[in-house]
Amino acid sequence: MDSNSRIYVAGHRGLVGSAIVRRLDQLGFGNLLVSTHKEMDLTNQAQVESFFERERPEYVFLAAAKVGGINANNSYPAEFIRDNLMIQANVIHSAWQHGVKKLAFLGSSCIYPKLAHQPMAESELLTGPLEPTNEWYAIAKIAGIKQCQAYRRQYGFDAISIMPTNLYGPGDNFDLQNSHVLPAMIRKFHEAKQRGDSQIVIWGTGTPRREFLHVDDMADATVYLMREYSGEELVNVGVGEDLTILELAHLVRDVVGFEGEIVNDPSKPDGTPRKLLDVSRIRGLGWSAKIALRDGIAETYDWFRTHVDEVRT
């Protein structure tokens, strides 16, 4: 992949896709192909095939997906499994069919069993039941991994699968009902501070442990793997450290400057007890995360305040 390669970033307006575009721009890749949902519906097979036949990309980053937090997964299970299966099937097949040299498929750490051994190595895939609150999304992503492996085995298609931990950063979804935990916390603490509230209520017991990776680190890892890795086995991308949801809440409170109390609501679901990735494989390939969590949260909060009138809320 060189600076003149025709590179298609599917999902370029999303959190991950936009970060990949930023990273490619920084590295001097100037021949990027993008398409909005209005221009091409990735769930529409005919439209995807037409795009690949017309544009002939050489490399593809498949970052397009329907995503959301616990509430969104519980509320829209049919959409999460249907849309993601269709997007993946269409893009991966058309990429192979039209001679793409290499494709990077972006998944999620939710592919691993609810009670997987911690930290979760790539070998934990399909070793136990999934977390029920996001199994629809997880099953779709597992299918994407298997499609990449199948096309490699049968057709020799160079498709790699990359599994990030929980991501956050500029351009995130800050909707209080459908977003992930960290951006939702940033918005919740910000608005509570503005109102002068005396307390904040957070979902669950606060005891589940989560790992968080800045999306710019994720984009850097994805481009690195596209250039340096070619194999059937999936690759985890994370920081190798986690913290409890309550500890995260205190960290966000400190960054935002909210002075009230944090109260847990144990009637709300906790989700998976722990999600920490084993990142020894990617570290063995020569990559590791660089952005510290507090620094990343501070940067994301600054971005949120600057774009508060236009962010997805």
Image (cartoon, helix red, strand yellow):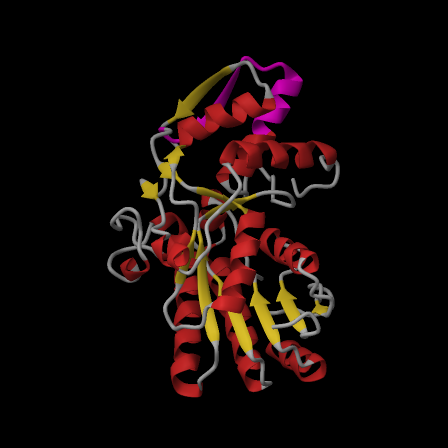
Q: Could you tell whether 55 is left or right of 78 in the image? A: right
Residue 235 in percent (x, y) is at 40, 61
**The magenta segment:** 188-205
Q: How many marks?
A: 0
Q: Could you tell whether 122 is left or right of 156 in the image? A: left
Residue 207 in percent (x, y) is at 34, 31
Q: Is residue 186 visible?
A: yes
Residue 3 in percent (x, y) is at 69, 69
Image quarter (top left, top right, bottom left or bottom right) of the N terminus:
bottom right
Where 302 falls versus 28 (above or below)? above
Image quarter (top left, top right, bottom left or bottom right) of the C terminus:
top right
Q: Quadrant of residue 237?
A: bottom left
Q: Is residue 269 visible?
A: no
Query: What residue is shown at x 65% (from left), y 70% (from top)?
Result: 8
Query: What residue is shown at x 43% (from left), y 63% (from top)?
Result: 141
- Viewer-closest of 310 and 73: 310
Q: Is residue 190 magenta?
A: yes
Query: What residue is shown at x 68% (from left), y 74% (from top)?
Result: 6
Residue 108 in percent (x, y) is at 44, 55
- Viewer-closest of 76 and 205: 205
Query: What residue is shown at x 51% (from left), y 46% (from top)?
Result: 167
Where 242 falls versus 260 (above or below)? below
Where 279 falls versus 259 (above or below)? below
Q: Is residue 217 magenta?
A: no
Where 149 falls versus 234 (above or below)? below
